[in-house]
Amino acid sequence: MTPTKPNTTALRPICKLIIALAVLGSPACPALDYEPLRMLILGDSNIYESFGKELESDFSAAGYQVKRRGKPTSGMARPDFFDWLTTGAELVDRYRPDVVLIMFGGNDGQRLEPFPGSGGTRIKWKHEAAWKAEYTRRIRTLVRILGGHGARVFLLSPTNRRSQKAVEKMQRVIACQRAAVGDLYFATWVDTWTPSSGIDGRYLRRGSDPAARHHHWREVRYRKGDGIHLTKAGAVDLREKIATELRRCGVIAW
């Protein structure tokens, strides 16, 4: 396979951040105006609810200009319900982000409906090979759209969940997502499945209260009653766990 030719515009967010940190951290240099990094945070109910709010709050506090758009029950399987390709293109053109965080997949373990006006056909979940090929194509297309103006794109996987049937479905979704961005130099897949799991491999239902860790240990719920959605404590715990990966990639917020 011919390697993808690097696009130097993808380095712009990191260069801007390095320059800004160097200026702000040097007592010998006067304070200079610089353009804040722009960030889009997009996804399903996890982004609409606590997890997305935690990310938005932290990156805003770090100096990013953040725009968050979450649509509950959305994903890439049902563009007849919500078309993320169209919405993503509109948001990128409007905000010209330097960094994009996206989180999809939790609602995608189902049939794939065609995009409106595309003339395509429905692909059933049981038709595994065709489903994988089309879903991978959709994720890759979306990531390319979001990175079209030189943004660095981070694709966050679905989290672990209680239902064994849902767990099995998410394994297919995650495999397709990783394959979709594997050779895109500007895109990074971020695992949230492992950090949302316990040592037994099952979904992490409860854990220590992040708000009380510096004082005393207290157990709280990390998931809501459906065994899928994160509580505020669960969202904080997950955000703290993925911070290392985001820092490693040059996205500094904490």
Image: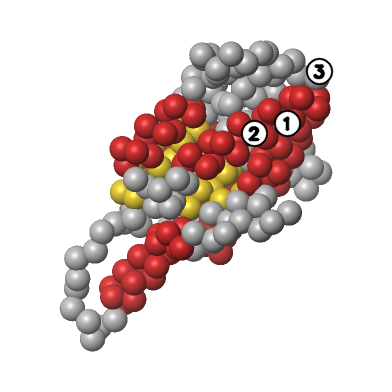
* Alpha carbon separation for disc pair 1 and 2: 6 Å
For badge 2, the amino acid type reads Arg
The residue most toward the front is 2
Tag 3–tag 1 contact (CB < 8 Å): no
Q: Nearer the viewer, residue 162 or 74?
A: 74
Q: Secondary structure at mark 2?
A: helix
Q: Is residue 124 above or below residue 5?
A: above
| Residue 251 visible in the current orientation | no
Residue 133: mark in rendering: 1
Q: Nearer the viewer, residue 173 or 142?
A: 142
Mark 3 residue crowding within 10 angstroms, few (<14) / some (14–19) / many (20+): few
The residue depicted at 80 percent of the width and 19 percent of the height is 127
Quarter of the picture containing the C terminus is bottom left
**Residue 189: image location, x then y, percent:** 62, 48
Quarter of the picture containing the N terminus is bottom right
Look at mark 3 in the image and give the residue it sits on. Answer: 126
Mark 1 residue crowding within 10 angstroms, few (<14) / some (14–19) / many (20+): few
**Residue 190: image location, x then y, percent:** 61, 49
